[in-house]
Image: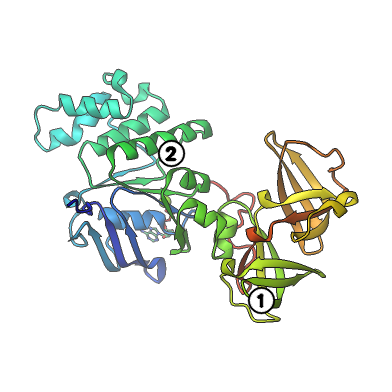
């Protein structure tokens, strides 16, 4: 009988970190299963690096414990943990060639015959041809792959990656995301990847933990987090959500009917993470790509049973595969709608009166006591690591 390999499980129990009176990481329980690609996602300053450094042993936790497999490593120094870290600054040795950079960990352990292992590692990261170059002769993406090879040659149980692609331009970053995912699948070890880029986390990870102010707000697969956010922070930070303030009108079976701006909206009870008492407030959420836009003159043709809202197009941007509309509506001042460019209705231009409508099944409900704008990226503070 095969027993499941758990030697690369990472288990954090009640782990926290305070600096003086400031809590960088609140007590955190988290299990990352062996062989998974796990992402810690959150804005700058939310405690991602601190969490990673506690796993690596570079930071002493204020409370709690860290286990790898069935070994409690909380009191082990970094070099005794089966963990390696790749940082944004690759920190390659500039005077050594690529081969020797990758061989470094083996040589330090006194291993003499390194050729075969180094060559295999260079093949894995597709740098076999570059072995005798110096780091400065490689592109940023290639240097980052050297850093990954240099870490993996030590056969860690867990590889930690702290914003490893942050210094690369967008196109290269996309390529490297796929490349890192391929490498992880090939070596099959646990990767914990820290990033502030939600697209990056969703592209690469099996499981994403969304962090906010030192806490994990929600954990799940990318699709689950996107479709079923439990908080306004997750709804706004992961992609875009339209959130409407509404009031519970009636509840029957698995349907909740809400009043919003004079109209009614239907919400599946199973998709509502908020308490619902009649007359109570709920935030109704709908993703921009789930909404259809119909010119008001054609509103009669909209099928029965869809949630609908009226509004006026305030702005539209053509971005190739889709057109992104901003709609002024009595229930929500800046409603976002993304329409695929298949058959474009020439009347859908700024100033046009429209009806927004969608399948009620795509609606989710959130607790209205939260900040409706939590996690909204404001101009000027985006994309710094
Ligand atoms: N050595 C330290 N002393 C005091 N505050 C720190 C220290 N290291 C990190 N912090 C603070 O802890 C918070 C979390 O930091 P960090 O884990 O680096 O965030 P992230 O990696 O998500 O950007 C930040 O507010 C940061 O300023
Ligand atoms: Mg960081």
Q: What residue is drawn where x is 84% and y is 51%?
A: 301
For disc 2, the marked residue is 165
* Frontmost residue, 248 versus 132: 248
For the image, the number of numbered tags is 2
Q: Residues within 10 Å of mark 2 (few under 14, many from 20)?
A: many
Can you give x and y, in whole percent of width and height, for residue 285 in the image? 65, 62
Quick one: SS at disc 2?
Answer: loop
* Frontmost residue, 330 versus 223: 223
Compared to residue 112, the image places residue 217 above or below, namely: below
Q: What residue is drawn where x is 37% and y is 35%?
A: 182
Left or right of residue 318, residue 75 in this image: left
The earlier-in-sequence mark between 1 and 2 is: 2
Can you give x and y, in whole percent of width and height, for residue 60 in the image? 27, 62
Can you give x and y, in whole percent of width and height, for residue 205 in the image? 42, 47
Q: CA distance from mark 1 to mark 2?
A: 49 Å
Left or right of residue 93, residue 300 in this image: right
Compared to residue 269, the image places residue 322 above or below, namely: above
Can you give x and y, in whole percent of width and height, for residue 300 in the image? 87, 54
* Frontmost residue, 93 versus 46: 46
Quick one: SS at disc 1?
Answer: strand
Q: What residue is drawn where x is 22% and y is 51%?
A: 5
For disc 1, the marked residue is 252
């Amino acid at each position: 009988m095969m027993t499941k390999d758990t030697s690369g499980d990472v288990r954090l129990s009640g782990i926290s970190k305070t600096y003086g009176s400031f809590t960088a990481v609140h007590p955190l329980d988290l299990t990352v299963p062996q062989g998974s690609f796990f992402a810690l996602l959150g804005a700058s300053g939310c405690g991602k690096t601190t969490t990673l450094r506690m796993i690596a042993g570079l930071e002493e936790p204020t409370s709690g414990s860290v286990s790898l497999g069935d070994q409690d490593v909380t009191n082990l120094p970094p070099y005794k943990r089966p963990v390696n870290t790749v940082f944004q600054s690759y920190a390659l040795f500039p005077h050594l060639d690529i081969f020797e950079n990758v061989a470094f960990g083996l040589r330090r352990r006194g291993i003499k015959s390194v050729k075969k292992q180094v060559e295999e590692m260079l093949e894995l990261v597709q740098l076999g041809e570059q072995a005798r170059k110096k780091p400065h002769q490689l592109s940023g993406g290639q240097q980052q792959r050297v850093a990954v090879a240099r870490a993996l040659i030590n056969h860690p149980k867990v590889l930690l990656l702290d914003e490893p692609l942050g210094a690369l331009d967008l196109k290269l970053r996309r390529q490297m995301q796929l490349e890192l995912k391929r490498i992880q699948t090939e070596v099959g070890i646990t990767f914990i990847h820290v990033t502030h880029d939600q697209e990056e986390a969703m592209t690469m990870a099996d499981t994403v933990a969304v962090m906010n102010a030192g806490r994990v707000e929600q954990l799940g697969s990318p699709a689950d987090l996107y479709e079923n956010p439990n908080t306004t922070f997750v709804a706004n930070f992961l992609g875009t959500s339209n959130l409407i303030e509404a009031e519970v009108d009636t509840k029957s079976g698995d349907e909740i009917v809400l009043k919003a701006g004079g109209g009614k909206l239907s919400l599946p009870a199973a998709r509502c993470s908020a308490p619902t008492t009649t007359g109570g407030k709920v935030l109704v959420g709908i993703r921009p790509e789930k909404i259809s836009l119909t010119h008001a003159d054609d509103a009669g043709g909209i099928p029965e049973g869809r949630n609908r809202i009226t509004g006026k197009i305030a702005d539209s941007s053509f971005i190739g595969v889709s057109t992104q509309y901003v709609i002024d509506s009595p229930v929500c001042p800046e409603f976002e709608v993304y329409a695929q460019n298949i058959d474009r209705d020439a009347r859908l231009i700024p100033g046009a009166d429209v009806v927004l409508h969608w399948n009620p099944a795509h609606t989710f409900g959130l607790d209205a006591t939260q900040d409706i704008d939590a996690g909204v990226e404001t101009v000027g503070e985006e994309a710094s690591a």
